[in-house]
Image (cartoon, helix red, strand yellow):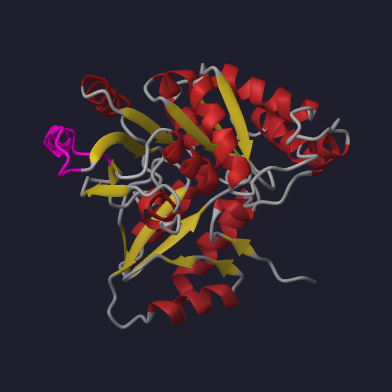
Amino acid sequence: MDKRVIDLRSDTVTRYSSGMKDAMMRAEVGDDVLGDDPTVLLFERRMAELLGKEEALYVVSGTMANLLAVISQTKPGDEVLLDRNSHIFNYEAAGSAVIGGLQLHPFDGIGGFLPVDELPSAVRPDNFHYPHTSLVCVENTHNRGGGAIYPFDAMKEVSSFAAEYNLRLHLDGARLANAVVATGIPFSEWAELADSVNICFSKGLGAPVGSVLVSDAETIKRARDWRKRLGGGWRQAGLLAAACLYAIDNNVERLAEDHTKASRIAEVIEADPRFKLVYQIETNIVIFEVVDDSIVIDDFIDKLALEGVLCLHFGGRKIRMVTHMDISFDDINYFEKTFSGI
């Protein structure tokens, strides 16, 4: 009998379901570079309508969607305001600097949320000695913030700040669907606060590939040009877009199950004096700290793996676990029975 494997490294490890596979195999395809893949066109139309924006662009990854959003709303030498723990600042290989020629101005927010009171003083004066401040980026939900949901009122404040200073606002909503399900606030209301939004489909939504960028028509036109320039044009992409259409129709509301699973994992960790939760659980990400100095973190992670539980060292003495659709409630029962004994 195969050994049980509970892969909590990320919600990117999901495998497509039989229903999603059937949708992919039935997809009508064309050539997306030539603009005639009907399934891609349908998906982009659906997402633009869902988020209340003029147009959408289907791309290979959330990293590409964020990069396209940033460089399509700035010019080389501009400065971008964002959180120091954001995905754009930490995990996107400095693309904004290397490709966009941009300077990033990071803030030390709490839980990944920008300190609104500090933002006005960061806007550069109109002086040729300084970079031009042009864009603000926020992340919702926040990966390094333990899956925290950006408080809607706080995001309203950031949106108002951006409008007052004539700045664009990009929402890295790679896991925005998790925030939608947890709060009941629709996609369109979150998107209304930003000029551009990225949603990733290869995380909790369970598609194998792809993210979508939505914005106004002019920004999407520039993003499409940049996508081609970066080698991101693809041909019969409708095969993959069909998976995303299936996900938006079938896999959004079920994210609530992942949140429940994460809460149950957190309860086990809270009950174990060797560990301490770094953040309270709001969605599907659990980050905890090893407070028992006798534990060597990498050894502990290896012991978990021997029991079939996979997770990630998350810097320092922190460990991250992420729940998703391929983790069953029976898997969580197994986790509860085995974790404390390791």
Membership of 117 in magenta stretch: yes
Task: Give the residue at the far front of this rendering.
Answer: 128
Q: Is residue 24 visible?
A: yes
Tell me residue 150's x, y (percent): 34, 34
Residue at screen point 37% across, 22% down:
193
Q: Nearer the viewer, residue 329 or 100?
A: 100
Tell me residue 220's x, y (percent): 54, 28
Vertical comparison of 322 with 36: above or below = below
Residue at screen point 59% across, 26% down:
56
258 horizontally vs 41: left or right: left
Label count reads 0
112 horizontally vs 19: left or right: left
Tell me residue 334's x, y (percent): 59, 61
Q: Main secondary structure of the magenta part?
A: loop
Residue at screen point 44% across, 69% down:
340
Vertical comparison of 282 with 294: above or below = above
Q: Is residue 271 visible?
A: no
297 horizontally vs 65: left or right: left
Q: Nearer the viewer, residue 126 or 322?
A: 126
Residue at screen point 31% across, 50% down:
279
Membership of 143 in magenta stretch: no
Rendered image quadrant of residue 49: top right
Image quadrant occupied by the N terminus: bottom right
Tell me residue 274's x, y (percent): 32, 70
What segment carries the magenta color? 113-130
Vertical comparison of 53 with 233: above or below = above
